[in-house]
Structure formats: structure tokens, C-alpha cells
Amino acid sequence: MPEPAKKTVSAFSKKPKTQEAEEGSCVVFEAETEKSEAKVKWQCNSKDIASGNKYAITAAGNKHSLTIKDITVEDANVYAVIAGGSKVKFELRVVSKPDAHPPDTRQDLTGLFTEKPQCGEVTVGENITFVAKVNAESLLKKPSVKWFKGKWMDLASKSGKHLQLKETYDRNTKVYTFEMQIIAAKPNFAGGYRCEVSSKDKFDSCNFELVVHEARATEGLDIRAAFRRTSTDGKDDSGELDFSALLKKRSIKPAHMNTDPDLDVWNILSHAPPSEYEKIAFQYGITDLRGMLKRLKKMKKEEKKSEAFLKKLDPAYQVLKGHKIKLGVEVANEDVEVKWFKNGQEIQKSGRYIFESVGNMRYLTINHCSLADDAAYTCVIGEEKCTTELFVKEPPVTIVKNLEDQMVMKGERVELECEVSEEGANVKWEKDGVELTRDESLKYRFKKDGCKHVLIINEATKEDGGHYKVKTNGGESVAELLVQEKELEIYQSIADLTVKAKDQAVFKCEVSDENVKGTWYKNGVEVKPNARTNISHIGRIHKLTIDEVKPEDEGDYTFVPDGYAFNLSAKLNFLEVKIDFVPRQDPPKIHLDCMGRTSDSTIIVVAGNKLRLDVPITGDPAPTVIWTKGEKVKEIITPQRQAWVFVITEGDGRVHVESTKGHCIFTIEGAERQDEGIYSVVVRNPAGEDTADISVKVVDVPDPPQAPKILSVGEDSCIVQWEPPLFNGGDPIIGYVVERKKLRSYRWMRLNFDPYPETTFEAKRMIEGMPYEMRVYAVNSIGMSHHSPASQPFVPVAPTSEPIGLHVEDISDTSITLKWRAPERIGAAKLEGYGVEYCKEGSKCSDEWIPAIQGLTERPSMTIKNLTTGDKLLFRVRAYNMAGPSSPAVLAQPVTIREIMQRPKIWLPRNLRQTLIKKVGENVNVLIPFQGKPRPKITWSKDGQPLDPSIASVRNSDFDSIFFIRKTERKHSGQYDLKVQIENVEDTAKITLQIVDLPGPPEALKIADVWGFNVALEWKQPKDNGNCEITGYTVQKADKKTMEWFTVHDHYRRTHCVVSDLIMGNEYIFRVFSINLVGLSPEPLTTKDSVFIQKSGIDYKSPTFREHDFSEAPKFTHPLVNRSIIAGYNATLSCAVRGIPKPKVTWYKNKMDISNEAKYRMLSKQGILTLEIRKPCPFDGGVYMCKAVNDKGEDVVECKLEVRRKWLAGFHPCNGNLFYFYRVIEFW
């Protein structure tokens, strides 16, 4: 029978993945299709690929591969494989070949190969050879070659019957040839290989791939195999002819396929009545319904006939990718052995496949299921077997690493990156709820790298700001992008300078952007560099240096940044000091002229900067200078007889004094807060003394504010408040900078760029339901403080909308029942419950609302009890969440607490207004609602008689009545009446119940007529129609040779029919089933007599064939291999031979027959010959020969066996030296 088509979305069971390869190597992409006959097409950049020198395309059954040879940079493209309506895209990334192999540290690495090993393909059982050639003309010594599989497996130790390494040298061409030959390839030989060659200071390597294909039969159509019979008893001439192999395959359009992986069509068909088959086929896109029904019928038939299995496998199983599944069967014989097969191949026990035997149960456990495990599994016991289908479902793709909020400047590049759980998964990007597609590729670029997905915006604009969302089929992630205009900040402005003649003047400023250039001007004229003037720009610092200042250099200097509408200005003052000649004994004089002073003669310096006090002095003889701060002497300069130049520093190295002719300079490196105060300078000489006081103030950035507090939150905003810092840095606070971040993120986002003057800030544009943290910086004229501690985490939420649909459900003299529906908008916060309140009509004050209960109720309804009869009350309901109560929902009119009389009324459901049909054995559960106050009296009856409790059960409430029968029988059919009565007022309803069963077999089946290849049948309707109408009959025929039944007519409505197209020479019997609403009759009616279709008289003479002689001489297909073993351990020698008739095998040692020696054990199984040598000693070494002889000839194979002695190591008992000794093994 043809196998049913699998309900999968993709035509591929294994998809090719994106790979990365080096230049010059080759790469193989592999794909597997669901159907072995599927046609596959490969493409590169949407263009078809054909086999040639560059590409090699192979197909073996359902396995397909594309090999790309000699990879270059131009091969880095997008490729695709197409099968039917499925298309899978993948990429090839090409990386440049590294200059050196990672483990090698030598610098001079050159190419040594003149011919590199190429990628190859081989079929299982065949041989393949890889060749590498090296030119030795420029080499000082013989090159050494190593072959590797994967990264580290050295193949030199794996040489044997499946791998041989050879080496040859041509003296004429001076070329070394290295060969690696793989013999009788196996599937696990496939993979990546590497060949490395090295010679002293030179090294080279080459990577190549080996693809191993499964052995397959010669393709082509065998017309004899196409006309086969579906026999299950092993006979060639029995069963129904099956021509499905000649039919063309039809592809099912994806639009008509139900892609829900949780639905099992086999299970639905097996439990559905035959009348629903066509409906199910149309609903689930089944095109080969007849084939599926035949297979389903055969599966049912096999379930009835099983002597080995007590419980078989289910028709199908489903498991998630990466999970494990356990398949189990129950066998009749507890000691029997079972075998498990996957797609016809026997499963071997391994880490992934585990076999268990517990009593009569046999289990197969598959760990870490992958898409390759999606296959048909069979359990075999002797000649019996049971089969199931395993479907592996891929789990939904989840987001492992979420998007991060970003804040960038206008024109910068933006990359929004996330990471998903599945490599190659599809994601969807949205901006403010609008999907971003490939059509906008000029603005947005989408990058996919394995599990990482990146949205790239090359040059961000203000319009690009907003909320970006990435979606998968298993989750989503949102991030906010803020785009700000670039603002140039001035970290250090230029200052006025006063310099003397031939001194150096340096104007220096620092801006926030190191890429900003600028222009210097003097009195409005651009300054050009020359021998004395130098302009420099290093990072964020711009300098104008003037050497040997002259009077004409005095003026206003301005720095203008390019592209910004502001400038920095300063003035250069030229100080000319004139010292008139005076006689000796000139008293000292301090000419104080330090720049940077304020109106109160205070010098301000920024903490961390250099404090430099330059004081001009005069006096003859040279005066002594003393610097003091308060009463403490800081530094003393020049002893009495010392000249003008000297330097004295304190222990910490920060404070030092430098004196030149006419000047005394006091310097503090890296000014600190404790350096603030009044400094005094005293100059003395014999002619007198002079003093001066200088006030120094050190300013710094302020201390960080305290942790901010969240005053309130809204739907997408919050109000945050903080306290000013304890120390303002000596300069007034001009504002604050506020930042926020998501709780689980590491990226802080600035909310304002200009200092905010207040201590209360409203943060907006947050995501509702996302936890955040806030922190604050303090800013003064010096700079920005460290950030404050983060606030407590908070979540922006908003109260829900008011509940809707508030109404009175029921009312009595002392209670009322209210009902309502949930709010339309709940928001991100969880709904905690509802609060119900009431007050008397006319109350104005909100305090008069009385809570109906203490706390909240989670249900959207409430019954308020213990109310006063006759009160007029107003009711309202509010919804509560984390943000508080919502707006109230209030009844429009006050309600009077008094019960209202209500006429009885039965609300009969629509489906009960017609006959209710149930099958025998099913249960009946009918709920009929009614109304009426006070509670009405309820009465049930059947066919005019009171209802017997043994027939049906009844359960009544204030609002409905439940009628149920646990297990129906034919006697339960009839009319049931329900009466609801309040005093003299009543209402009635009736229900008609029909219990149906399978019909009996037809009657009086007979053969009315026989002519040619046709038979006429007649029968009568069955006596028992199952309490419902007979909808048709199923007519079947069977050949008496096979007794396999085939349906001729299904759902046939007449009581007579003609069976045509019978085969002459066969004898047939017929049977008929009755069909009603329930299904087929349990037993058919079979004809008593059979019908023989007469032959037309043509004698058939079978052809004679000459018998083929299959005999052949013995031949060893696998030789003996030379071995070296250790004495004392059992050893085996193996070879393989074939020959017809079976040859006689004799073993020899050193040409002596050893067949009768007890030391040797000879085994033979399926042509595999094994000689086992038990505990060999060194005397067992020699030449062993195996000889096979039959009537057609003989063949001999031999090998050498070396037996090595065991040796042990020990220490000499006297001198402790290490020595070795042999262990002598005696044999007897």
C-alpha cells in the first residue's frame, strides 16, 4: 500500500545551515527531504546552479548535497535549496586564509603544496584516495606530513584495514607525493580533514571535506516491480494489484493543509464513522483518502491477529525537539527477544537509544530527539512486527537576550541586537507598532548571524526615535531609541593672559567632541602659523602657542569651532617690567600682578588643576622669600648668599617654588580642597622687607545627590524627587542630570542634556509594566558630580478603566446580587480584585459609601446580604491594581430592596427542540435553565408516567434542572416532559430521546445471476435496524485462494447490485454489511455458494528457462592483516571468503595444519572466518595461512603474527636503581 503523506509544513526533514569557510577550501551543504523521489533544485542569488567544475550536486534517495570547490571571496553569497513549494535559504561566509596556523609560532610561513588534497565524495563500501604534493627544491630537509580528522585527531595512529598512508619521492622532479587512501568507506568517515606539511622554518596546511553517501540501487523504473500485489502471506500470486508506483505524485498545496502539529489524522480517522471520512479528508487536505483507508483497515486487521504482541505501538507519537520519548510494547512471551528498526535499519544500543526489558514490557527510549529522529519505527518479534510514526516537533523560538534601550546623537550608527534560542529563526521587527520590511532597506538593514539578529540604522535622525520591537513565535522584546541633537560642550575655556616680553603665551581650550576643528582669530583676523606661532589640535584640546611674546602680540584672541554659532574669547596683556638702576641697598618690593583674581582679590582654582602664583619682586641685594599659609611656613627660598635660581619642595612633592630673575613662582600640583586659604609672601634683604597676602579658593565638582525617591507613577511616566548634595563643590549648583535604565539592563539612558534646575522631575516615555531604576547627577560650573545611588525599582502602571456592564442579577427582601464584566483596559499590572460599595439615595458625601465586604473580591459578581427591606440604595464597583482604584461603575438608578414576583418560564436550548440522538453506551447530560420566583416546583415524566429514578437521575437548583443518564440503553428512548409550577401558574417543555445502535446483518443474500465476468446479488433489509434508518450497504468480494476481502460497493442504497470486472479462472464468495447512523453491522451476511468465473478455453503454456549456474571458486574478499600482540592475552585473526558451493576452510601455522589443536579455535559465520589463539606465547609467532577449497578451485591468504613478551619494571633492593625484567610465561 502507498504510504500516507506526512503532514509537515516544510518538504525538508533536514535543512542546510549557514557555514563559514576559508579561501581555497571546499564546503558541503547537505539537505534531506521528506520524500525520496522529491526533485531538488539549488540556487545562488536566485539563479539556478548546475554541476560543473565549480559545483558538484549529488542526490541519494532523500539525501541531497551541494559541494563548492576552490572557494573564493566571490562565492560569499546567499544560496537556496528548493523542493516542491518549500525554499530554504542559507549563506556561505568566506574568510581570508590566516598567515599562520594557530599552534605554530614561527613567523616565516610560506606555501609548500604544489598540489593540495581536494574535497571528495564516496559511496559506502568504496575506496577513495587523497593526494598532496610538495616541491622539495628549496627545502633543506625532507618535509614531514601529518593527516588530521577534525581539529586534533592524528590519523597516523589509525592506519589499518580502512586507512593507509603512503609516501613516494621523484628524484627527477624533486617532488614528494603523499597519499591517504580510505578503504571500504563507512558513514562515520564523513567530515572535515586537514593535511599539514612542515620543514624546518616553513609550514603549510590545507582543509578538505569527505562526503559519504549511502549505497543505493540503480535508478530506473522496474515495470515488474510496479505491477505488484499487496500480499501479506508471502505468496506472489495473492493480494490486490497495486499500481501506485506508476502514478505521478501530486503535491498538496500548503493552503489546504492543516499545519497544527497537535492533530493526529490517523487517530481522527480511526475513531470517526465512515460517513465522516470525506469531510475529514477535505478539512485536513488528504488527497489519497482511498489509500489511507486501505492502510487503516489493514492496521485494524493486524491488531486483531497478533500472537506475539499483547499490546502494540500506537499509530503515531509526537515529541518536542530536544526531549526524550519512550516507546513501549507488551509481548506475550516474557523471554522473547525483540529488535527495533528505524526506517528499516536496525537500531544499535548507544547513549541515545536505550533498550529496556521489564517483565512482558519492552521499551525503546530515545534521548535528546532531533529532526533526524522523525521516522518510522518498527518492533520485530520473529515474523511479526508493529510499526509507528514518530513526529519531532520543533519548540517555539524564544528571545534569550532582550533588546537594550539606546540613546544616540543625530547622524550616529545604531545597532539594536537580540539573541534567540534557535539558529536561523525568522523574526519580525516593528517600530511604534508598524512592521519594518525589506522594502525599506535603504533606511534599515537586517543582519542575521546565527542566533543573533541585528537591526542597523546607519545615520540616525530625529524621526528614528521611538519604540522598536522584535517578535518571534515564542516571545517579543521592546526597546526605546532616543535620538538627540549634537551639542558641543566646553570643558575648559580659554583665559586671559598677562605675560612679559620674550615669555611664552599659551591659549588652551577643551571641547566635548574630539573631531571638531576650529579657527583662531586675533582682533577679528585669522591667525596663521609661523615661526613664533603654533596651532595644535590633539583630541579634545585646542592650543594656540606664541613664543617670545612681543608688544604687538597684545590683543583679543578668539577660538571659533567649525559648524557651531559661538566662540571663546580671551585677552593677551603685555607686561613690561622696568627696573631702574639704583645703588646697592635697594629695599625689596613685591609687584603683585596675578591673574584670575575676583573682585575681592581671591584667586579661584579648579580642584585637580595646577595652582601657580607668579609674583614679580625687586631688591638689591637679592631678597630672601618666605611663603606662609596662616602661621605655618611652607617653603623658604634662597639662603643669604645664594643666587637667583633654586627650587625647594616639601615631602609630598606637590608643592614647590621656582625663582627666576625678578620673579618668584609658587606652584601646587593637583590642587585639593585643603589647599584653600590665605597665602602670605615675605621678601627681605638688609635694606628692608615687603609683604603681600593672596587669597586662594579651590572649587570642585559637587558631591553626588542622595538616592532619589519615586513620588508617583503613571501609565508611561513617573515623578522622581531628590535632595541636593551635602557639598556643592564651592560653587552654586546650576542643575541636575537625570538617568534611567531597565532593571535587568546595564545601559543607563540620559533623560535631559541641559541641567534641570529643580529637584523634582517627571520622566516620560516609559514602557508600562517594565521595572525601572533612576539616578541623578549634580552639575555646577566646574562639572558634573558622580551619580547618586539608584532608586528603588518601580514599575510604571496606570489604574484600569472602570468595570463595564454593571447590572442587578437578582434581588430579594434582604439581599441583592450584582454582576459586571472586567474592565476593557487592564494594563500591564495584574488585576487585584474589585471593591463593591453602596449608600442610601440622596447621600452627597463620599464618606457615606459603605464597603459591601472587607477587602476585595476576585469574581465579577457579588451577593450583598443583610440589607433592610424597602431601602433605596445606590451601588458602585471599582477595579483595583498596583496603581490603585479605577473610576467607579455606578448603577444609573437606585434599587429598592424588595423581592419581585416572576412567572415560571422554561428556556429550552435550541439543540433540544429536535430529537436528541445518542449511541448505546453513551451518557446523556442535559441542562435546562428556567426562571421563576419564588423557587418553582419541578416535575419530570416519561411518556406520560412519572420518571422512574432507576431510568434517569435529576438534579435541580434555583435556576436550572439537570437530567442525566450515565449509560444509555435502547429502553431509554422516548419522550420526557418537564413541568415548572408556581402556585397555579406553570410552564412545560418536552425532550425526545432516541438511543441508536449498530444494525443487524442483511437477510436472504443470494446469487441471482452469473454472466461473463459479472455476478448479480440480491438481499433483504435486516430485521434490526438499530433504532434508526438504514443508510446503505457495503458489498465485498473475496477470492477463495487468498480469502482477502475487497470492497466493491460502499454506502450502496439498493438491495441488489451487480459485481463486475471479475477475473476469469478465480472462484469468488461475497458478503454484505448493513450501515446506519452508528456504523457497519457487527457481522456480515455471506453467500452460501461460491461463483467460479469460467475460462474462455485458451491454454497457457508456461515458458521454459535455462537454469543458471551460480557456482564459483573460493576468493578471499578481505585478507589477513599482519599483527603484533602481547603474550598472555587472547588474539584473533580474521578474513572473509566467498564461494559456491561453500568452501572447506583449513588453517595452517608455518605450513602445519592446526585444525585439531586445542589451543586454536576456528569460527565461521556468513563467510567471516576467525582464528582465535588462546593466551599466546612467543613461540606462537610465525606465518599463519588460511586455505579455502571447493569443487571450482581454491584460494590462500596468509599473514605474520609477532608475539611480544611482557616486561615489568622495578627497583633494585640494594641501590634503588630502576631495572627491567621479563616475565616468563610457562605453557603446558
Image (cartoon, grey):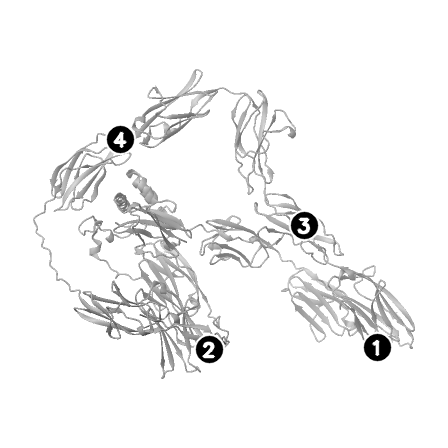
The relative height of residue 507 versus residue 1005 in the rendered view (above or below) is below
Numbered label attached to residue 202: 2
Given contact means CB atoms under 8 Å apart, are the residues at marks 2 and 4 in contact? no
Question: Which one is earlier in the sequence, the residue at label 3 or at label 1?
Answer: 1
- Residues at marks 2 and 3, CA–CA distance in whole angstroms: 64 Å
Q: Image check: 866 left or right of 299? A: right
Numbered label attached to residue 476: none
The relative height of residue 712 versus residue 66 in the rendered view (above or below) is above
Residue position for label 4: 1026
SS category of the residue bearing label 1: loop
Amino acid under disc 1: Ala
Viewer-closest of 1013 and 788:
788
Given contact means CB atoms under 8 Å apart, are the residues at marks 1 and 4 in contact? no
Viewer-closest of 531 and 780:
780
The relative height of residue 163 versus residue 761 in the rendered view (above or below) is below
Residue position for label 1: 643
Q: Residues within 10 Å of mark 1 (few under 14, many from 20)?
A: some
Question: Which one is earlier in the sequence, the residue at label 2 or at label 4?
Answer: 2
Q: Image check: 1227 left or right of 830? A: left
The relative height of residue 220 versus residue 580 in the rendered view (above or below) is above
* Residue 307 point in image, percent of width and height: 26, 46
Amino acid under disc 4: Gly
Q: Residues within 10 Å of mark 2 (few under 14, many from 20)?
A: some
